[in-house]
Every structure is written in structure tokens, then in C-alpha cells.
Amino acid sequence: MDDPQKVAAYVEAGRENGVMAPVYMFHAANICEVIRAGDVVVDLACGPANQLVMVARLNPDAHFIGVDMSSPMLEQAKELISRHGLNNVDLRHGDITDLSVFAGNSVDVVVSTMALHHLPNVVALKRTYSEVARVLKPEGGIYMVDFGHLKSGRSIDYFAHQYADRQPELFTLDYLNSLHAAFYLEDIRQAAHSLFKQARLYSTFLMPFMVALKSPARRGPDMALAIKFAAMKRSLPSWHQKDLADLKTFFRMGGLSCALLG
Ligand SMILES: C[S@@+](CC[C@H](N)C(=O)[O-])C[C@H]1O[C@@H](n2cnc3c(N)ncnc32)[C@H](O)[C@@H]1O
């Protein structure tokens, strides 16, 4: 993902009022649940760091390392991190299928959002999960979420064009390509097998348009954080609040809930 126009469209979609805002908020809450103060958190394929920065701002006592193989994306990430004056985030240029820069059992939490479908095949997906299993501490946390491959082309088209009137055409096309490139739920289940001691696989109800591998919550009830999420939710335009509520419902019906989102 080095094409400047694609990078710009993706960055735009993730900004405060961009079409991805409710999705980032949903993932941020789930990620926060698996983080504790003092943790080292690695974000695989962090892209322009829209998600990473949101989570790092909410967890000033944790340290974050974003890994990505695209220099233009990392440039965007660097700019966003410095704009927010964050000193708890580092970036590394690298391939997520090879995490040899991290020692075994050295990472407290691994996260990844909407990126695994960029991997070329199931072998690369399996290698990535094996690397996660190697670097993660035994009691570590996981939240790795991505699109799932829908069986019918009509469903893919429906999801891809759902917000076409609210976003640049390039982003709609990119989303369509992502949904086509997404792995099937069954392939994800088999590839992620090495992590099932620490995490469970969830998908949205009826149609697995999103699939999340999540460990049990690692922080206790956190009223201050729940209040922050409630305020963030209220600040969203009403159509984004509806998107967030829908995502919450479809995941809850698939077994995944998040106390921080109420
Ligand atoms: C759609 S973006 C997602 C970015 C971010 N996680 C988010 O939620 O906004 C996908 C990112 O995956 C990165 N990527 C794809 N394959 C990769 C690989 N094998 N290793 C590292 N980064 C990769 C791309 O460079 C791109 O920045």
C-alpha cells in the first residue's frame, strides 16, 4: 500500500469524522480491554496509525510499537504521532510475517486491525499467527481483527458500497478489493490455531464480514475509561453512532462483547 492516492484516501477515512471512525472506536474499546498499565503493545501493520494513536492516547501508561512495511504509511503515522505529542509510541519498518526483531515471550499484547487480508496467502497468515504466539508472553493479550471473506459476490458488493455516498470513490474501491482479498473464516480458524490457548475467535453474526481473535479482558472494570468512550460516542454524528451500534450488535450476537462500550 504505497500508492500516494490510496494512502491519502485511507488516512482521510480514518480521521475524526471519516467513514471508519465508528469502526476504529469499536476496535479501540476492545483493544483497551486487553491492555494493562506498563504493557508493551505491538500493533501489526499499523498503517497511518489512526487506530494506534487513538489507543495510545487512551493508555498513556503503556508503550506501543507499530510495525508496517510501507514507508509512506509510516510517514503518515509519524506525522500523526508528533501532532498528538505522544511519547509512548515507536514505529518499525518491517514485515509482520517475520517478527524476529522481537525476542520470544517479550510482548504483553499484540493487536492488528483490518490488515491481515493484505497478506498474500494462508501460509503467510499462519506464519504471522505463529510469530505472534512466539513473541507473546504466556498471559499476554490479543486483539487481531480483520474482514472475513463473504461467500456471495452480492454480499461483498453490498458491504463495499454501503457507505459509497459518504466517502471518496477510491476508498470504496479499496474496500471492495479488501473484502475480495479477505480470508475465509475457516482458513483464519485453522491458521490461528496456535493462539487458541490465549484467545477465542469471534465473527459477526450470520455473515462473517468481520472476524476478531480476542483474549479475555486483562483489565478490571474501568469507569474512567468507560466514561471517555461514552463521551467519544456522543461526539460522533448520529449516522456514525448507528454504525457503531450495529457493529456492536452483530459482534455481540456472534459472542463478542466489550464492557467499555456499555
Ligand atoms: C488497510 S491498512 C490498515 C492499517 C491499520 N491497521 C488500520 O487499522 O488503520 C493495511 C496496512 O497493512 C500493511 N501491510 C500489508 N502487508 C504487510 C506486511 N506483510 N507487513 C507489514 N505491513 C503490512 C500496509 O502497508 C498497510 O499500511
Image (cartoon, rainbow, N blue to C red):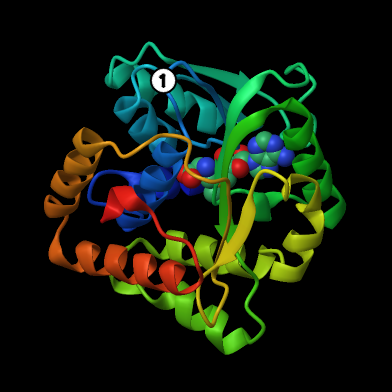
Residue extending farthest front: 220
Image quarter hosting the C terminus: bottom left
Residue extending farthest top: 87
Name the amino acid, label 1: Ala
Does residue 2 appear in the picture of this structure? no
Ligand 1 in which quarter: top right
Disc 1: which residue:
37
- Expressed as whole percent of the image width and height from the top left, the position of residue 40 reads 54, 20
Indicate whether 66 appears above or below 168.
Answer: above
- Expressed as whole percent of the image width and height from the top left, the position of residue 89 reads 45, 18
Residue at 52% in and 37% down: 47
Residue nearer the viewer, 170 or 243: 243
- Expressed as whole percent of the image width and height from the top left, the position of residue 93 reads 65, 22
Does residue 79 appear in the picture of this structure? yes
Indicate whether 85 appears above or below 72.
Answer: above
Indicate whether 222 appears above or below 151.
Answer: above
Residue extending farthest right: 123
Residue at 53% in and 60% down: 174
Residue nearer the viewer, 254 or 159: 254
- Expressed as whole percent of the image width and height from the top left, the position of residue 14 reads 36, 47
Circle 1 crowding by C-alpha within 10 Å: few under 14, some 14–19, many from 20 = few
Residue at 41% in and 20% down: 37
Image quarter hosting the N terminus: top right
Indicate whether 85 appears above or below 124.
Answer: above
Report whether 35 appears left or right of 183: left
Residue at 40% in and 37% down: 32
